[in-house]
Image (spheres, grey):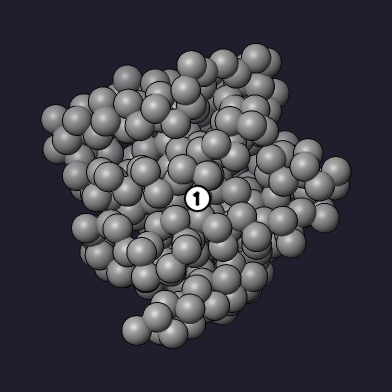
Amino acid sequence: MNAKNTDFSTKTTLNCNGLLLDISKPAVMGIINTTPDSFYQSAKKISVHDVLILAEKMIKEGAAILDVGGMSSRPGATFVEEEEELVRVIPAIEAIHSHFPNQIISIDTCKSRVAHEAIFSGASMVNDISAGAFDKNLWQTVAALKVPYVLMHMQGTPATMQANPTYYDVVKEVVEFFKQNIFRLNSFGIFDIILDPGFGFGKTVSHNYKLLNQFEIFNLFGLPLMAGLSRKSLICKVLKVNPAYALNGTTVLNTLSLLKGAKILRVHDVMQAQEAIKLIEALDDAAI
């Protein structure tokens, strides 16, 4: 596949609450978990001190976005109450914003109040696994905040999504999901939208690889695509490893997603994701 065929998105920049995110070339979103309940235990950073150390490392390695979350979305995860989520994420966001005021911060939440408080604490993007399904006020809140929104597909909830995920055609169903929800988001006045097919969220290993195999089809919407593949079970189950040993597999799948049009890689390991991007850029340059 010629790497020059990957420039599909019609959007090249996103206004993140006054900070401009350039997605004319792929960008990296670094994952910062402030929850003790994470599928990848090495990624969890509970104290503000730990968060700042990880944030600084990721920024130095080239993370354009830091995604702060306070509720685990691993398979089987239980719901976290609003107050507890706020206690986890707001001090982390305030600290990152204070130390790195020009850094774009995303809040990974499905709750409108958490999104609101996070944006006023220094975040400038909302990453929602629920597509607005868990809080009827979330989209209205995002519209009022005027920040970019990550629209992700998930079947079920984190507690139930891997019980028995079933599709008649997973790719067609995710395409239809995007079509319907982009229209609904636009009706709220939300136009800066990032699409995430939700690898690992209510999908079998086979479903995940079908989505990745046809990942380029989601470019038909002309919106930036995000690939969240980092250390997930679609890698671990095939390679028979645990998440701690899934970095090489992550890099392979990230590279494939880049070739198929991914504009944002959501990862635990920023340096390796940036290296994949640089190598694809070299491949692009060689095709000129």
Q: Secondary structure at mark 1?
A: strand
The amino acid type of the residue labelled 1 equals Ala
Percent position of residue 69, x then y: 55, 44
Q: Is residue 285 above or below residue 104?
A: below
Percent position of residue 73, x then y: 61, 33
Answer whether residue 90 is visible to the viewer in this image.
no
**Residue displayed at 69% across by 40% down:** 234
Disc 1 crowd, CA 10 A, few/some/many (<14, 14-19, 20+): many
Q: Is residue 66 above or below residue 203?
A: below
**Residue 284 vs residue 108, the one in the foreground:** 284
Q: Residue furthest front?
A: 1
**Residue displayed at 81% across by 47% down:** 239
- Looking at the image, residue 204 sits to the left or right of residue 39; the answer is left
Q: Which residue carries the number 1 mark? A: 227
Percent position of residue 275, x then y: 59, 75
**Residue 123 vs residue 283, the one in the foreground:** 283
Percent position of residue 146, x then y: 21, 47
- Looking at the image, residue 125 sits to the left or right of residue 100; the answer is left
**Residue displayed at 78% across by 39% down:** 237
- Looking at the image, residue 72 sits to the left or right of residue 89; the answer is right
Answer whether residue 190 is visible to the viewer in this image.
yes
- Looking at the image, residue 241 sits to the left or right of residue 251; the answer is right
**In the rendered image, which quarter contains the C terminus?**
bottom left
Residue 285: which quarter of the image?
bottom left
Residue 32: which quarter of the image?
bottom right
Q: Is residue 4 above or below residue 10?
A: below
**Residue 281 vs residue 34, the one in the foreground:** 281
**Residue 115 vs residue 261, the one in the foreground:** 261
**Residue displayed at 23% across by 59% down:** 11
